[in-house]
Image: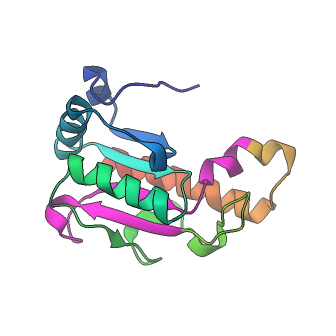
Amino acid sequence: GSKILMLDDPELFKYPMAFMWEPGFWNLTHEEATAFRAYLTKGGFAVFEDFDGAAQWAHFEAQMQRVLPAARFVRLDRTHPIFDCFFRVQDIDAIVHPMTGIRPSYYGIFEDNDPSRRLVVVPNYGNDVPQYWQWSRQGLYPFDTSNEAYKLGVNYLIYGLTH
C-alpha cells in the first residue's frame, strides 16, 4: 500500500518521509515548489528513485533548484551515516540498477549546504532500488543484492524518522 499525495497537499506534513519516483520527468507548479520547500525545511526527508541519464539529471536538478534555490548536491560515499544508521549496507555500489546494470550514484542535499547537518534529500541517481523489493519474492534478482536493497530502504526510513 501507499499514499500518493501532491506536493502542495497539506496532508504531506503528516509524513516525515516522501518517497518519489521518476523525477527526471518532474514538472513542479509554483505552488508545489513552495510547499515542498516548506515540507523539507520543516523537517521532511525525501528520497528520489528511478532516473538516469544526463537529461533526466539536469531536469531533476533544475526542478530542485526551484524548491531549494541555494542547495548543492553532494555525492554520498559509503561512509555517510545513512548507509549504517540501522543496518550496515555492505556495498552500496553493488545495488546496481536492476534493469540496466548501471552503477548508482547517491547524492544528498543537506540543511544549509552543510554535510554535518541533516540530510534533507537523497536522489538515487542511476538506480531503482524498489525494483529489488517489488520482485524479491519472484527471485528475479540476486538474493544478496535484494537483501542489501532492503537494508538501504530500512535505513532511509529510520534516518527519515530520526533526523
- What's drawn in magenta, residue-wise? 105-134
Q: Please say whether residue 47 is visible from this viewpoint.
A: yes
x, y percent for residue 139: 86, 50
Q: Residue at x 64, y 62 (%)?
A: 148
Q: Position of residue 105 (x, y in %)?
A: 50, 70
Image coordinates of residue 35 in percent, x first then y, are 21, 33
Residues 91 and 48: in front is 48
Which quadrant is the N terminus positioned in? Answer: top right
Location of residue 17 with respect to 93 vertically, above or below: above
- Compared with 12, 34 (above or below) is below
In the rendered image, which quarter is residue 7 located in? top left
> Can you tell which quarter of the image residue 28 is in?
top left
Is residue 93 inside the magenta stretch? Answer: no
Quadrant of res 30: top left
Q: Is residue 67 left or right of residue 19?
A: left
Q: How many marks?
A: 0
Q: For the point 46% across and 41% down, which residue is it?
A: 20
13 to the left or right of 53: left
Residue 33 in the image: state x and y as whole percent: 23, 38
Residue drawn at x 27%, y 26% is: 8
Q: Nearer the viewer, residue 44 or 88?
A: 44
Above/below status of 49 relative to 78:
above
| x 40%, y 25%: residue | 5
